[in-house]
Amino acid sequence: MRVKAETYIIQCDRCKNEILPGNPHACDKQNDFCWECGFVEGKLTEKEYLKHSGFALSNIRAWVEDGKINIKFGKYTPEELRIRRNKRARERYKQKKNTRGE
Ligand SMILES: [Zn+2]
């Protein structure tokens, strides 16, 4: 939501914080999100999020759980990988269902 057009201050539609000029943010047709919320809302990929968050390390992971961003150094544990795989499979299944119109 652009609240003060004349000064180009953008407000995040999720956490209502102002997004300062020059700070990275995510937007789609209707909404503006700060960087964190953009990731939570799925507007940014994990790679994009980390790239502009000051994490220059390659073996760092970020994911969203219950609306909160989790950041972890190092590789995923097998258990974490299993959870992520299952979640993706469920999302794919849901998408397929939607396109079939069920
Ligand atoms: Zn936000």
Image (cartoon, rainbow, N blue to C red):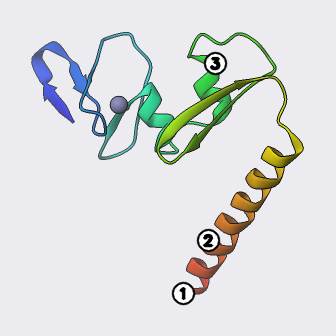
Give 15 or 78, whichever is nearer the viewer. Answer: 78
Q: Dividing the picture into quarters, in which one does residue 77 lie?
A: top right
**Real-space Cα separation, disc 2 to disc 3, in angstroms:** 28 Å
Q: Residues within 10 Å of mark 3 (few under 14, many from 20)?
A: few
Q: Residues within 10 Å of mark 1 (few under 14, many from 20)?
A: few
* Extreme residue toward the bottom, this view: 102
Q: Is mark 1 within 8 Å of ligand 1?
A: no
Give 95 or 63, whichever is nearer the viewer. Answer: 63
x, y percent for residue 3: 13, 28
**Real-space Cα separation, disc 3 to disc 1, in angstroms:** 37 Å
Q: Amino acid at mark 3?
A: Lys
Q: Pick whichever of labels 1 and 2 is earlier in the sequence.
A: 2
Residue drawn 74% across the image and 51% down it: 84
x, y percent for residue 90: 68, 68
Q: Pick whichever of labels 3 and 1 is earlier in the sequence.
A: 3
Q: Amino acid at mark 2?
A: Gln
**Left or right: 37 as drawn, with respect to 19:** right
* Extreme residue toward the right, this view: 78
**Left or right: 44 as drawn, with respect to 28:** right
Residue position for label 3: 51
